[in-house]
Amino acid sequence: MVCLELFLLFATTLATLSDAYSIHVPRDVGISLVARQNRNNRQNNKNNNNNNNNNNGNAQLTLQANNIQSASKATGQNGGTPAAGQSNSLTDDANFINFCSGKQTTNGQQVRGGSCNGIVMGDIPSQNNMISTIILNPKPGENLQANKAFDIQVRVNNLVPGAFTNPDNTYYAAPQTLQGGKVVGHTHVTIQSLGTNIEAAQPPDAKTFVFFKGINDNGNGQGVLSASVADGLPAGNYRVCTLTSSSNHQPVLMPVAQRGAQDDCTKFTVGASNNGNNNNNGDSNNNGNQNGGNNNNSNTNVDEKQQDKQGNQQGNQQGQTRKNRTRFNRFRSRRGGRGRSM
């Protein structure tokens, strides 16, 4: 009985203490706390997403360690002193990734005042897939008719032709690429005047040309590409050359320095007359005239000799006549003046 009374007294005391220390939270206050917690959670999620996006963007702008080329860190010379005929290379520890900082960038444009292009060079073919070109038409030294249409034809080995990006806004804007180990791109043909001498000693101005065409198709599928000069050319001396390019118009890159050229040039004339031959014929005629003159001189000399001979003969005859006359007059005087005078 006593134990039961003690237990009930303990339970009553404990309940009283619980009520004394309990905290009463109004209903509206509880709802407010829950809403605030949810807002905080949403903001944290948003911040996390932004951080993830920023990290992804930074990853695209980060030079990955496996892309760093150690050769760019050295000048290429032992001790820093260039070997005879060589120069120190520029150096950079990060592939020159910021080489164009502070400069006018190319940014896909043909910047006539000059620019800096930060796009990587790209894929380079093997030595067995190096590009080589030959001009088929016009032929070397060929003379074409003035102002008459003609086709320029070239054959290009190891080029996958027909890839030609917009030159107004993608110029040098992407790296060189390969397909089947061969450069993907196209070629151009350009004609320049050589003035009055096909054997000109001074290079023509690169800014000046009489014809230019980017060939953006794949030709006959066997490497032969062509461009039409619809109006022909005026009479003169000319040089035609090829400019082989990757898709974004940059000159093609080859794997080794010692090689044959990837482009070709040839010289031809338009509307040339046979002046040279005529001059030669004229020289022959002059020789003929000279020979004729010599012959005339010879005849003249012969005539003069004959005339001299005839003159001498006539002179001798006249002299002999005078002698005979003198002798007759002397004889007549001795005869007393008889006889007819001579």
Image (cartoon, helix red, strand yellow):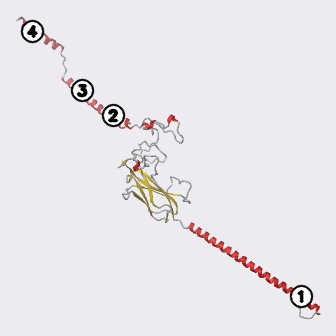
Q: Residues within 10 Å of mark 1 (few under 14, many from 20)?
A: few
Give the mark toward the camera: 4 or 1: 1
Element type at mark 3: helix
Residue 37, numbered circle: 3
Distance Cα–Cα, label 4 vs label 1: 213 Å
Residue at numbered disc 1: 327
Return the disc, 3 or 2, that comes first in the chain's sequence.
3
Return the disc, 4 or 1, that comes first in the chain's sequence.
4
Which residue: 38% across, 35% down?
65
Residue type at mark 1?
Answer: Arg
Distance Cα–Cα, label 4 vs label 2: 65 Å
Q: Residues within 10 Å of mark 3 (few under 14, many from 20)?
A: few
Element type at mark 2: helix
Element type at mark 4: helix
In this rendering, the answer to whether 136 lies above or below 247 is below
Residue at numbered disc 4: 7
Return the disc, 4 or 3, that comes first in the chain's sequence.
4
Give the mark toward the camera: 1 or 2: 1
Residue type at mark 4?
Answer: Phe
From the top left corner, tell me how far across and down residue 340 is, in percent.
Answer: 89, 93
Distance Cα–Cα, label 3 vs label 2: 27 Å
Residue type at mark 2?
Answer: Asn
Which residue: 84% across, 84% down?
319
Residue type at mark 3?
Answer: Gln
Residue at numbered disc 2: 55
The answer to whether residue 13 is seen in the rendering is: yes
